[in-house]
Amino acid sequence: MSPLGVQLLADLHACDAAVLDDVEAVRAAMLEAARRAGATIVSECFHRFSPHGVSGVVVIAESHLAVHTWPEHGFAAVDLFTCADDLRSDHCIAWLVEAFGCGRHTTTRVERGRLPAP
């Protein structure tokens, strides 16, 4: 049986600290990433922390896209969860790598909700 959803965990290293600390830049990048994935945007919420860092989520009809940034470390953690088979997750992550000026990244794929056979 196929899983109910797939979660992609992307660790983005050596990113542009100024971008990661700019809530409007992070918001714009995340919304564009959702669009490039072919997701249907439902809502979004972003917050800039003091003294630095941004967290945000884009709620999509297919589930969610979330980010947490540590500008002081040039690091962003991105989480894309989807229950849709046709979401272009590779386009989403590729755009964020570009938008955040990422030097290197890793992506881990986790299948969620693999139900036992009846």
Image (cartoon, grey):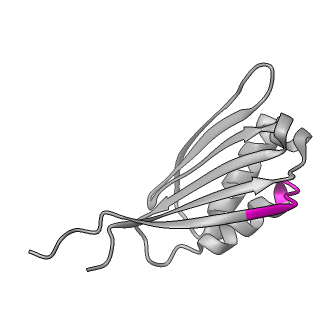
Where does the magenta region start and end? 99-105
Q: Number of marks in the image?
A: 0
> Which residue is more in the foreground, 79 or 34?
79
**Residue at left offset 76%, top offset 44%:** 26
Position of residue 67 relative to residue 84, above or below, is: above
> Which residue is more in the foreground, 62 or 113?
113
**Residue at left offset 39%, top offset 66%:** 5
Position of residue 4 relative to residue 25, above or below, is: below
Position of residue 75 relative to residue 9, above or below, is: above
Q: Is residue 46 left or right of residue 23?
A: left
Which quadrant would the C terminus be assigned to in this image? Answer: bottom left
Question: Which x, y percent locates residue 34?
Answer: 62, 60
Quadrant for residue 108, please give it: bottom right
**Residue at left offset 22%, top offset 68%:** 115
Which quadrant would the N terminus be assigned to in this image? Answer: bottom left
> Which residue is more in the foreground, 61 or 108?
108
Q: Is residue 87 left or right of residue 69?
A: left
* Residue 103 drawn in magenta: yes
**Residue at left offset 76%, top offset 62%:** 105
> Which residue is more in the foreground, 19 or 104?
104
Question: Which x, y percent locates residue 19?
Answer: 86, 43
Instruction: Please identify the residue farthest to the top as the structure is shown.
Output: 50
Question: Which x, y percent locates residue 21?
Answer: 82, 35
* Residue 36 drawn in magenta: no
Q: Is residue 96 left or right of residue 36?
A: right
Question: Which x, y percent locates residue 65?
Answer: 56, 53
